């Protein structure tokens, strides 16, 4: 099932990529024909702009293709635990239950961001009394 979904995504991205590249090539060929016949005077800036647009489209499509093929990287840490007394509802992102006198590793709300909350006051609360 997962392989089928990946194949459909891959084929759709390849089809879109081929269509975009075909349209860009046709546009460039049309401009070249118009320039050769003297119907259109194209400056170097416009040609550079067309090449830049083509390069950006190719890069964008390659990045999307890599995002489809590579697995999503998640920040380390456990998934959020369900809220107490409310089955099926998870805690807010970046919030973990304070379980006793231990330091807690919490996954941040943004991708790749990990925050370490040192709960030294809880761990050493006996020494503060």
Image (spheres, grey):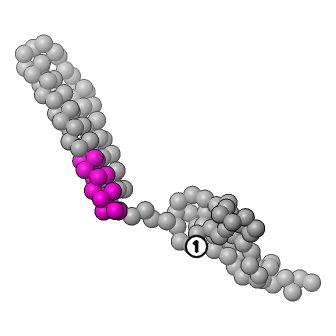
The residue shown at (74%, 79%) is: 99
For label 1, the crowd category at 10 Å Cα-Cα, with few meaning under 14, some 14 to 19 and many 20 or more, is few
Name of the residue lying farthest toward the top: 39
Q: Which of the two residues, 56 or 86, is positioned nearer the viewer here? A: 86
Residue 125 visible in rendering: yes
Count of numbered circles on the image: 1
Q: Quadrant of residue 21?
A: top left
The residue shown at (27%, 31%) is: 49
- Residue tagged by mark 1? 78
Residue 111 is a magenta residue? no
Looking at the image, is 27 positioned above or below residue 37? Answer: below
The residue shown at (28%, 35%) is: 53
Residue 94 visible in rendering: no
Name of the residue lying farthest toward the left: 37
Q: Which of the two residues, 72 or 1, is positioned nearer the viewer here? A: 1
> Main SS type for the magenta part?
helix
Q: Position of residue 24 (x, y in %)?
A: 21, 33
Q: Report whether 55 appears left or right of 109.
A: left
The residue shown at (39%, 64%) is: 71
Q: Which of the two residues, 60 or 51, is positioned nearer the viewer here? A: 60
Q: Position of residue 64 (x, y in %)?
A: 34, 50
Q: Position of residue 87 (x, y in %)?
A: 69, 66
Q: Quadrant of residue 15?
A: top left
Residue 11 is a magenta residue? yes
Q: Quadrant of residue 129?
A: bottom right
- Bounds of the magenta segment: 1-14
Looking at the image, is 35 positioned above or below residue 17? Answer: above
Looking at the image, is 115 positioned above or below residue 104? Answer: above
Q: Secondary structure at mark 1?
A: loop
Q: Report whether 79 appears left or right of 70.
A: right
Q: Report whether 75 appears left or right of 129.
A: left
Name of the residue lying farthest toward the bottom: 127
């Amino acid at each position: 099932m997962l392989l089928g979904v990946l194949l459909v995504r891959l084929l759709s991205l390849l089809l879109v990529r081929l269509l975009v590249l075909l349209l860009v090539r046709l546009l460039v060929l049309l401009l070249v024909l118009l320039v050769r016949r003297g119907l259109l005077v194209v400056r170097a800036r416009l040609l550079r702009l067309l090449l830049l647009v083509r390069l950006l489209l190719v890069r964008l499509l390659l990045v999307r293709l890599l995002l489809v093929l590579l697995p999503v990287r998640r920040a380390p840490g456990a998934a959020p635990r369900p809220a107490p007394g409310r089955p099926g509802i998870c805690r807010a992102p970046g919030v973990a239950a304070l379980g006793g006198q231990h330091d807690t590793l919490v996954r941040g709300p943004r991708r790749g961001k990990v925050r370490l909350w040192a709960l030294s006051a809880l761990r050493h609360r006996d020494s503060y009394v």
